[in-house]
Image (tube, rainbow, N blue to C red):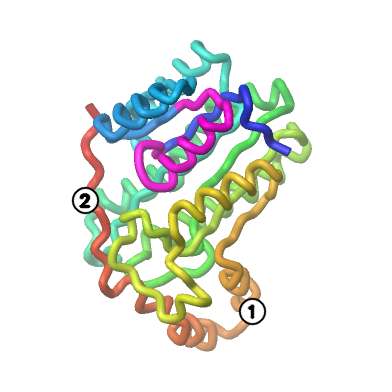
Amino acid sequence: MTDFRGKIVLITGAASGIGKLLAQRIAAQGARTVLWDIDATALRDLSEELRGLGHDVSSHLCDLSDREAVYNRASRVIEQMGGVDVLINNAGVVTGKSILEAADEEILRTFEINVLAHFWTVRAFLPGMVERNSGHIVTVASAAGLAAAPRLSDYSASKFAAVGFDEALRLELKDLAPDVRTTVVCPFYVATGMFAGVKTRFPWLLPILPPEYAADRILDAIRKNRQRLIMPRFVLLAPPLRLLPPRWFDGLLGFFGVTRSMDEFSGRDALPPAE
């Protein structure tokens, strides 16, 4: 079991959405939380809230699309705290645009934050975990990393990559440091605002997940060292359905409403610039 008490837990994208809920819950369980985000105002507000409750919190403004910024912030954390025990790569962005609508810069940013930032944070903090043969790395991916949808070409591709990243990392750690744990999280749409406007045809099968429910499930998966969390359970059908011919697979995605789920997507405003 992963116990958060007294552990140093770093969360990326910590100032809003699932990241904020995880930070609040993990801090309340006695962890020393390290918060990374690009939104200076939201990051300050969350830090003040948690400190006001007596929690041990440090926060760092960090643009995860900037590799050098990630390494610099990580070096500061290692210098001040000696490393981290739990790394939660939670930050993510979505354009909600088709491949021809999205600008080159938007596509690059999707991959820089949703995929490449995982490499930089893990490369920064994993050596300490390997040396101690102890730690936990959490990759927050998506159900879109198991089955794609229109207007998610860059997002789905990045989340497929995140799922593959976790799998390769898990296998590498079997020999490198078998007691360093990994967890990949693949939720359907979560009602945080990031995917505002999305629809589901069968809410009883594919519900838009309440963020509090999603955060609690993620924490439970980390505590129990579960290697994979897919929610809701219906999404577990995505991998075996890939054995079907593409025409049938696409037809099922259409029947269950996945291919039209982004039709009314509005999302939240673009990320603020790093200060």
Who's the residue at 50% across and 69% down the image?
147
SS assignment at label 1: loop
Residue at image position (48%, 23%) is 55
Residue at the limit of the structure toward the top, as seen here = 79
Q: Are marks 2 and 1 in contact (CB under 8 Å)?
A: no
Relative to 112, 56 lies left or right: right
Taking depth in this image into account, of 34 and 247 the one nearest to the observer is 34
Identify the image quadrant of residue 91: top left
Residue 218 sits above or below residue 247 on the image: above
Q: Is residue 127 visible?
A: no
- Looking at the rendered image, the disc whose residue lies closer to the viewer, 2 or 1, is 2
Left or right, 166 with respect to 181, comes to left
Question: Measured from the top left, where is residue 60 in percent x and y?
Answer: 37, 24
* Rendered position, 128 above or below 137: above
Pointer 2 residue: 269
Quadrant where the image shows the N terminus: top right
Amino acid at pointer 1: Leu
Query: What is the x, y in percent for residue 59?
Result: 39, 24
Q: Residue at x 37, y 26 (%)?
A: 47
Q: Which one is in front, 215 or 185?
A: 215
Q: Position of residue 98 (x, y in %)?
A: 28, 67
Q: At 49% from the left edge and 11% from the top edge, which residue is drawn?
A: 80
- Does 248 sit left or right of 223 as displayed? left
**Of the residues shown, which amino acid type is indicated by label 2?**
Asp
Relative height, residue 112 to residue 199 (above, below):
above
- Residue labelled with disc 1: 243
Q: Crowding near pointer 1: few (<14 within 10 Å), some, many (20+)?
A: few
Which contiguous range is marked in magenta?
Answer: 13-34
Magenta-colored stretch includes residue 55: no
